[in-house]
Amino acid sequence: MRLICLLALSITVSLALDNGLARTPPMGWMSWTAFYCEMNCQKHPHACINEQLYMDMADRMAADGYLAVGYKGVHVDDCWMDRQRDAAGRLVSDPQRFPSGMKSLAKYMHDRGLTFGIYEDYGTKTCAGFPGSYGFLQMDAQSFADWDVDYLKLDGCNINLDLMPVGYPEMARALNATGRPIVYSCSWPAYLINQPQKVDYNVIGEYCNLWRNFDDINSSWKSIMSIISYYDHMQDKHIPTHGPGKWHDPDMLVIGNAGITPDMARAQMTIWCIWSAPLIMSNDLRNIAPVFRDILQNKAVIAVDQDPLGKMGRLVANTTDVGVYLKPMTPVDSATGETSFAIGILNRNPVNRNSVEFVLGRLGLSSPGGYRIDDLWTGQLVGVFRPTDSFQTVVNPTGANMFKATPVALANLKGLRFATFK
Ligand SMILES: *[C@@H]1O[C@H](CO)[C@@H](O)[C@H](O)[C@H]1NC(C)=O
Ligand SMILES: *[C@@H]1O[C@H](CO)[C@@H](O)[C@H](O)[C@H]1NC(C)=O
Ligand SMILES: *[C@@H]1O[C@H](CO)[C@@H](O)[C@H](O)[C@H]1NC(C)=O
C-alpha cells in the first residue's frame, strides 16, 4: 500500500512543468495595452502592429538602459497573423505588416541580446478573430520553435471553458516536445474568474510558468486599484502557489502612459515588485519622460521583484486609505533564519497625503537585533530600528513608498546607531 502511494506521488512530481525557465519573474515589453490591435498603418504609421514597432522597441530597450536592468523580452500580442493558415495549415504572419516573418523578427531580438515572445490563443480564434490553435496545438508549437520563439502567451478566447484543463496542459506538452525552451504564459485562470472553485493554482503551476488571473489592465488608476484590490483579497490563495518558475501575473506595467502620474507609477511599480510579479511594460519607449524611465529602471526596486526567494509579499495592515505590504527577501541570516523584508506602503486616497506610523515588531519585523532601513525610491538610508521602535512615513495621494529592512547582523552599518525615528 505504502509503495503504491509513493509511486503515485513520484509520478505526480515528474509531471510538474520542469522546463527550468522563469526562475525569476519575466521582464520585458509587450504591445497590447499601449497599441492594442491597431492595424491601420497608413493612418498610424508609428503606432500600428507591425514588425517596425517591435524593432523600434527593441532598439530603445537595448540603447536606453532597459535591457541592462533586466527588461529583456519583446513580446508580440494579438493581431500579428494573417487571417488564414497556409496550405499546410501553418500559421503565417500578416504579409503587409510583418513582411520579414517571425523568424527574422526573433533574430532581430536575439542579435541585440533580447528574447522574443509571441501570442496565440487556445480557442478556434484569437480574441481579435485571427486563427486560434484549437486543433493545431502541436503544429503551432513546432512553428514557434522553428521561428526561435522564447516565450508564448496563450490566450483563452473562443473556447469552451471546460476544455481549459485539457488544452493548456496539451500545449505545455507540445512545447516541451519541440525541445526548445519556451516560457509558457497561460490565460487559463483569467477566463475562470467567475468559477473560482475550478481554479487550482497547484495544477496550473505544473503546466505554466506564469498566468493571468484577472481583468486586462488599462492606463488608469482605477484599473491599477482594481487589480491590487483583487490580489489583496486573494492573497491567501496566491501566496503559497507563487514562486520560481510559476508566477501569478497581474498584467502589464502602464508606467509612461497618459493618465498615469509619477506617483501612480511608483505605486504600481512598488506593489508589482512586492508581489514578485512579471514586469512587462506596455508603453511607448520612443517618447517616455525621464521621470518614468527612472522609475522603471530603479535597480534597488527591481532587485526586490527579482529576489531569488521569489516570494509574493502580503498585505499585513489595512485602513480606509492605506495598505502596508511586507515581502520576505534576501539576504537571509543562515544562523537564525531571519529574512530581510521589502516594505511597501500604498496610499489609495486620490487627494490626501497620509502619514503612516507603526511599530515594526507588530507587523512582523521582529529580529531582536533590529534592522537597517533604506528608502528605495529616494535611495536614502532612513536609520537603524529595533522591533519596538515606531516607524513613520508620509505617502502622497495615489502613491507608494518603499523600503528595505535588513537585519542588523547582515547589514552594513557604517558606524550607525539605533535611533527612534521621529
Ligand atoms: C521537457 O520536460 C522534461 C521533463 O519534465 C524536462 O526535463 C525538459 O527540460 C523539458 N524540456 C523542455 C524543452 O522544456
Ligand atoms: C479600465 O479599467 C477599469 C477597471 O477595470 C474600468 O472600469 C474602465 O472601464 C477601463 N477603461 C477602459 C477605457 O477600458
Ligand atoms: C482594505 O480596506 C479597504 C477600505 O476599508 C477595503 O475596501 C478593502 O476591502 C480592504 N482590503 C482587504 C484585503 O481587506
Image (cartoon, grey):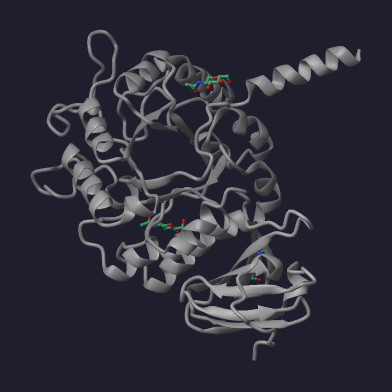
Asked if one can make out residue 282 in the rendered structure from this viewpoint, the answer is no
| Left or right position of 255 against 230 | left
Of all residues, the one furthest to the left in this rendering is 42
* Residue 144 drawn above or below residue 356: above
Asked if one can make out residue 64 in the rendered structure from this viewpoint, the answer is yes
* Residue 181 drawn above or below residue 135: below
Quadrant of residue 415 in the image? bottom right
Q: Image point 47% across, 17% down: which residue?
A: 174
Q: Residue 400 at x, y = what percent?
A: 51, 72
Q: Quadrant of the C terminus?
A: bottom right
Q: Image point 26% across, 42% down: which residue?
A: 37
Q: Residue 200 at x, y = what percent?
A: 67, 35
Given residues 372 and 156, the one toward you in this image is 372
* Residue 279 drawn above or below residue 297: above
Of all residues, the one furthest to the front in this rendering is 415
Q: Residue 235 at x, y = what percent?
A: 66, 53
* Residue 133 drawn above or below residue 30: above
Q: Image point 66% across, 62% down: which residue?
A: 340
